[in-house]
Image (spheres, rainbow, N blue to C red):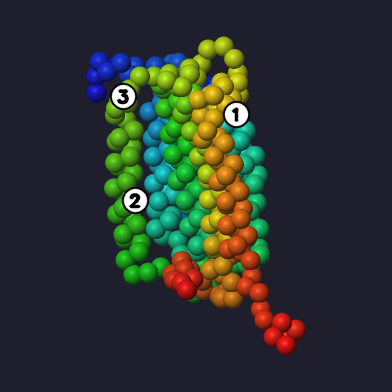
Amino acid sequence: MTQAQGAVLVDKASSGPGGQWFLAVAAVLFTIGMVGLLLRRNVIVMFMCVELMLNAVNLTFVTFARMLNDIGGQVVVFFIMVVAAAEVVVGLGIIVSIFRGRKIGTTADNAVLLKG
Amino acid sequence: MVDWIVFLAGTLIALSGAIGVVTLPNPVHAALSLVLTLFGVAVLFVAQAAHFLAVVQVIVYAGAVVVLFLFVIMLLGVDRDEANIGAESLRAQKPAAAVIGVASIGLLVALSQVNFTTGAPSTAGAADGPGTNVEKIADSVFTRYVYAFEITSVLLVIAVVGAVLLARKPKPLTDEMTA
């Protein structure tokens, strides 16, 4: 893209790594989380992989906050953390009710037993 | 130079922890690897002058969320390897994950290297300049985003009530109740 739209990607710390490096790390982190979500069968570990993906997105927000020199990106990450905490509480509650009474061999497939 | 060292250290910590979460068979080890990743991301936050978020990351994520994970793991007694509980992979699960992973990493890394950002910078306030990082975030949260901030309190109450409802044992009918 050209910079004619008024979006100048200012890189303050010109001596350090640029924003693209952080974005690449975030992309790798997100992919690892996604592959883990697809590979693992344990519900709790799948949930941890969701947390990995959330953290990758947070890193992207912070990187863009620096690149665009806008504090709004960091405020959004603050709200994401609040929502993620709420999500963990509810998600672990659901996991506890999936596991209740059937400890051995419980996978995400057992979530269907919650019906009704 | 020192910026690069910090960046590489944070990246190494975060990515090795992430790989640990995905590969370690024991859920307790995966949770401890998750702590490593969260610390690494906090280091990357500090490297980008997001000091408040780095502190919140360590306190809320590494401190509270992972401890909650460990509590649930130990409470349910699922601290065993996946192979030992008879949870083998589904057919075609691993190839599908590999294909999607390679496609996703290629796409995301390529996208992140394109200079695609649009719009006017500094609509919510500048991230640099005088004042500390905490002051700037507080200015933004309590003025521009104050309604969103208040609504998060409602969200947290709903989450707590929901968790209690979900995790509560269904009350068994005792003899005294039926009699």
Horizontal arrangement in the rendering, residue A108 relative to residue A100 (left or right)? left
Check disc 3 and report the residue beneath it.
Answer: B118
Give the crowd class for mark 2: few <14, some 14-19, many >=20 residues within 10 Å.
Answer: many
Circles 1 and 3, Cβ within 8 Å, touching? The answer is no
Q: Do labels 2 and 3 share a chain?
A: yes
Check disc 1 and report the residue beneath it.
Answer: B52
Q: Do labels 1 and 2 share a chain?
A: yes
Viewer-side residue, A50 vs B88? A50
Three-letter amino acid code of the residue under disc 1: Phe
Circles 2 and 3, Cβ within 8 Å, touching? The answer is no
Q: Is mark 3 on a helix, strand or loop?
A: loop
**Residue drawn 52% across the image and 44% down it:** A83
Q: What element carries label 1?
A: helix
Q: Position of residue B53 (x, y in %)?
A: 57, 32
Q: Where is residue B103 in the image (x, y as percent from the top left)?
A: 29, 48
Three-letter amino acid code of the residue under disc 3: Thr
Circles 1 and 2, Cβ within 8 Å, touching? The answer is no
**Residue drawn 50% across the image and 25% down it:** B144
Quadrant of the image occupied by residue B60? top right
Viewer-side residue, B163 vs B74? B163
Viewer-side residue, B52 vs B96? B52
Tag in front: 1 or 2: 1
Tell me the CA gap for discs 1 and 3. 26 Å
Say which chain tag 3 marks: B
Q: Residue furthest right?
A: B176
Tell me the CA gap for discs 2 and 3. 28 Å
